[in-house]
Image (cartoon, rainbow, N blue to C red):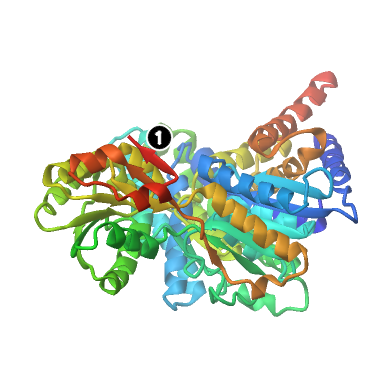
Amino acid sequence: MRQTVAGVIFGALVAAGMAGAVQAQEETVTLGITQIVEHPALDASRQGVLDELKERGYVEGKNLEVTFENAQGNTAIAAQIARKFAGEPPTVLLAISTPSAQSAAAAMSKTVPIVFTAVTDPLLAKLVADLDAPGANITGVVDAPPLEAQLQLIRDMFPEAEKLGVIYNPGEANSVSQAQALEALAPELGFNLIEVTASRTSEVMGAARSLAGRADAIYVPVDNTVVSALESVVRVGYDADIPVFTGDNSSVARGALASLGFSYYDMGRQTGEMVARIIEGENPGDIPVGTVDKLELILNSSAAEAIGYAIPAEFQERAVEIVD
Amino acid sequence: MSLIAFLGALELGLIFGFVALGVYLSFRVLDFPDLTVDGSFPLGAAVAAVWIVGGGSPWLGTGLAMIAGAMAGMVTAWMAVKLKILNLLASILSMIALYSINLRIMGRPNIALLSEPTIFVPLESLPVSRYVAFPAAIAVGLLLVTFLLNRFLNSETGLAMRATGETPRMASGNGINTSVMVLVGMALSNALVALGGALFAQSQGSADVTMGVGTIVVGLAAVIGGQSLIPGRSILVATLACLFGSILYRLMVAVALNADFIGLKAQDLNLVTALLVGLALVLPKLRLRRRPA
């Protein structure tokens, strides 16, 4: 008896779920969104996609139907969300974050277009085989920091600088790959790279001190450990008159001299443009994986003062924000 | 819920069926609340993924994942029985240590298995859709493991293990080495959980260091939920009930994912799932109270 009762209840729930699914309309475009967790940066990128689509005439509730699912940080639920979308394929599936994109790629048939965003390395994540020609049904925008543009900024602001110090945690995968990329880029821009490492926040101060007198500028990549202890790097920079540049824009308010980075909202806008192109008939396999091209320069005037540097007017004009 | 979403829920429910069997063994048979599973699930995924990406056989990788899981379970059991650390605390220590160990094994937080030769690849060339073939294959494996587990728990060693969990003092009074029983049982339990993790990574296309979060919750929901819906004293009924509970849990999540039509939003998912599972637990009891059997 018990089982029958449970069966009936369960049957009713399934039926209710199915009734909810039967809403597909013919003229509207459907956008499925799978996101691993709600987080300010990821939410901003999602909002960017929706705003961009709106600007291009796809208005949510009018001719655009958005189904947003978030896995609450759980990869098993991300897998189930991917299956839900596999069963009711949207016009385009937007996957925010690496795990969400991977489970979408594993579950979806190869005909539904998937656009990823906030993925750092789509090659390592095996989402695409070639960044310029993804080939299959997947493309997207990466959130890797724009290292070349950042090194170029240091070169432009300090044409005389030769030795560039970098501090990172060798235990963080993202930092190691940034350091490797920097090793390749530095000579092209005329820098001699000096790498120092810190495995924990308490070691950052010592690592930064070791650069005093050895480096003409310090670059801090997007590294959780070093950014957590950024103040100790800033202190060393002020004491030794070394400019400190960071990979993320938010560190400038904490005392770094400058950063040339991107906002997750703008990354979303760029992703939204890709989604619109696919809705309009382009094949995702023909759209190269994008990097964020809208970069924002942020400067810190008191940091400049502390190292006795007068920020040239051209940079002050370029900057979207100058922190005191 | 579409058919593919239903089959997806079934597939995940079956994969987490291995976790449910593992949790049944520790929580019900040995009476050992074991949080190690939050670490041994991604441990299984990590070992299998590293092995497969390194060019090894996926079958061997899955086997090695089970061995790694067994070792993790033994460490927890050893801390509990030899070092006399409270069993819950011992398992918490293993769980947090495994986070670092998993990162070390993988070398990075995420290893992609998309387009790698997993044990599921041969199924892709079958004439049936992978949405059907995967759960069918996993069901066969799961039933085989359930059968073997039943054979074991009804063997002499298995009976000794059950006695250890039931009344440890009487068991040792009857000449059973209860420490060995806890070690073996915990090893077996975490080997099953790691097997679930290895299969999950291979079916979902990646191993991720965060994928263990909440494994114990899902496992307990399956064991307690399944057993309250299908009560029964025999081991066979109990293990099958755990599998049923695991599948039911995933179906509830699938229903919750479709709950947007009543105004619920994505962030309500966990709440809806909890309510549905709670409802499934309580309703049969309400029914019984009204008309006592």
Question: Would you place residue A175 above or below residue B23 in this image?
Answer: below
Q: Residue at x 42, y 60 (%)?
A: A146
Furthest residue in direction left, as rendered: A213
Quarter-of-image position of residue B257: top right
Whether residue B198 can be seen here? no
Query: Label 1 is placed on what type of residue?
Result: Leu
Residue A127 sits in quarter = bottom right
Above or below, A64 relative to A166? above
x 34%, y 47%: residue: A224
Q: From the image, which quarter does the C terminus of chain B lie in?
A: top right
- Measured from the top left, where is residue A282 in percent x and y? 73, 70
Q: In the rendering, at what x and y percent does residue A273 appear?
A: 66, 59
- Mark 1 — residue? B88
Q: Residue at x 52, y 40 (%)?
A: A40
Tell me where residue A105 appears, x and y as whole percent: 63, 64
Viewer can see residue B173: yes
Above-or-below relation of A199 to B232: below
